[in-house]
Amino acid sequence: MEVKSPTKNNNNNDKGSSFEVDGVQPTPSPIRKMIAVASIATGVQFGWALQLSLLTPYSQTLGVPHVWSSFIWLCGPISGLLVQPIVGYYSDRSTSRFGRRRPFILSGALAVAVSVFLIGYAADLGHSMGDDLSKKTRPRAVAIFVVGFWILDVANNMLQGPCRAFLADLAAGDEKKTRTAMSFFSFFMAVGSILGYAAGSFGKLHKIFPFTETVACNVFCQNLKTCFFFSILLLIFLASFALIYVKETPKTKLELKDDDDKQVSCFGELFHALKELKRPMWILMLVTAVNWIAWFPFFLFDTDWMGREVYGGAPGEKAYDTGVRVGSLGLMLNSVVLGLMSLAVEPLGRMVGGIKRLWGIVNFILAICLAMTVLITKVAEHDRHMTGGATVGHPSEGVKAGAMIFFAVLGIPLAITFSVPFALASIYSSASGAGQGLSLGVLNLAIVIPQMLVSALNGPWDALFGGGNLPAFVVGAVAAAVSAVLAIVLLPSVKPDDEAKVKLAAGGFH
């Protein structure tokens, strides 16, 4: 197609179209529109923070045994592996009159609303269907909760991919604008995480909405409902504003005809990319996979560890609920440190001799932190034993301080994990001539496959040692140390000039 010179259209001066229509080269949209779209990440991450901090404990209050609770999280990596590529593929090829990305973002937001209702009201719906509240396990509530949980994971993946793609469309190929847009997205993700974890740490939010109190729903459940109400209100407001304010110029079927002849399925491209991978990318995938074996137990059981091992409670007890809320506060500190650390990744990389060496160093920090959970737990258990159980729900100031330091320090390696592997994938793919998009998609396999393994094996592994969370954390500590050695020894070094070309902005975990 011949590219014509852009023509001025007085009726559409400020649309900032993301697409090339009738041969006209698109121009980048104003920054304010990118900010509006990027702000949706606050709503998405607010709900995700609640999911990470509260839903493993909540599933156990409904009667899901600790040994099985990790299986519920299989949906996350599975939906990440399947839903994001499928949604991305079909949103690229959408000819909807509302645009390519906006219908998927709207659908994802509505799906979040449905999932939040099912999760928040699982106990009430289960009770109305015949669950016996005197029994430890409420099977109908558990079934409703699991359905809502899986819908929430799918919805989050439906939202995040199209939002990022929408930002890239608005940048219209301008590299500086693209980097700026993705930095805004990362910033709003950090804001959402801090707000979500902060909400989860308050124990009296349910008083704002008195109607959350029911026979089947205890105080922990009431707070969960209230937090999710705030989550959906925030997401609907931000998504509605962005979708109304920022317009898209849809592609026609005729414009997509040439692409139809050239493209194969998203999974076909992915498998082809795997066959063409060079050695540096295979090593990067190995290091990333081992690293996520270390991280995922923390994401699954951080607040459960606080409620169970540190505060000495069992699901449904006041001591456990208090520990979970304090764990949410710890995760908020973690997000603050992560955000600050993300600003220092590039200078720290130069200081230690490269970003691959920096990744190795912080993985040793991760290993030490995960190993420290054993010490913190043993001190808390010793205190409870010496006081005859008087410190159940009230650990010593030293134990609480140690736990808060644990959460905060982990923000340092987490910032590196959310940025450096993706930067290295971009550098290695550029050096080999491979497509960056597909290389990042391949790297995603090295993240989701370990997550699936940990979700499937974590509960039975913990049960072998009498239950609790320490066995998984110990395995995580070993995996972190191994990934540190692999990163330093095996990963190819990167030239400083190549590092300088890559934007090291921390993202988020989904």
Image (cartoon, helix red, strand yellow):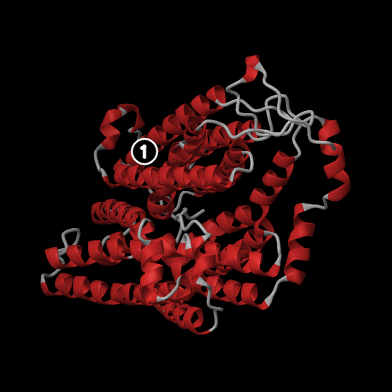
Tell me if residue 77 comes above or below residue 351 in the rendering.
Answer: above
Residue in front for this viewpoint, 276 or 402: 276
Residue 57, quarter of picture: bottom left
For mark 1, what is the residue?
Answer: 227
Residue in front for this viewpoint, 133 or 340: 340
Image-based side of 412 in relation to 249, left or right: left
Tell me if residue 85 comes above or below residue 308 in the rendering.
Answer: above
Q: Position of residue 221 (x, y in %)?
A: 36, 42
Q: Residue furthest right?
A: 261
Q: Is residue 216 visible?
A: no
> What residue lies at 83% left-to-right and 52% top-to-bottom?
264
Using a 10 Å C-alpha cutoff, classify the residue at mark 1 as few (fewer than 14 neighbours), some (14 to 19) or many (20 or more).
many
Kind of residue indicated by mark 1: Cys
Q: Position of residue 229 (x, y in %)?
A: 40, 33
Q: Position of residue 421 (x, y in %)?
A: 52, 66
Residue in front for this viewpoint, 153 or 343: 343
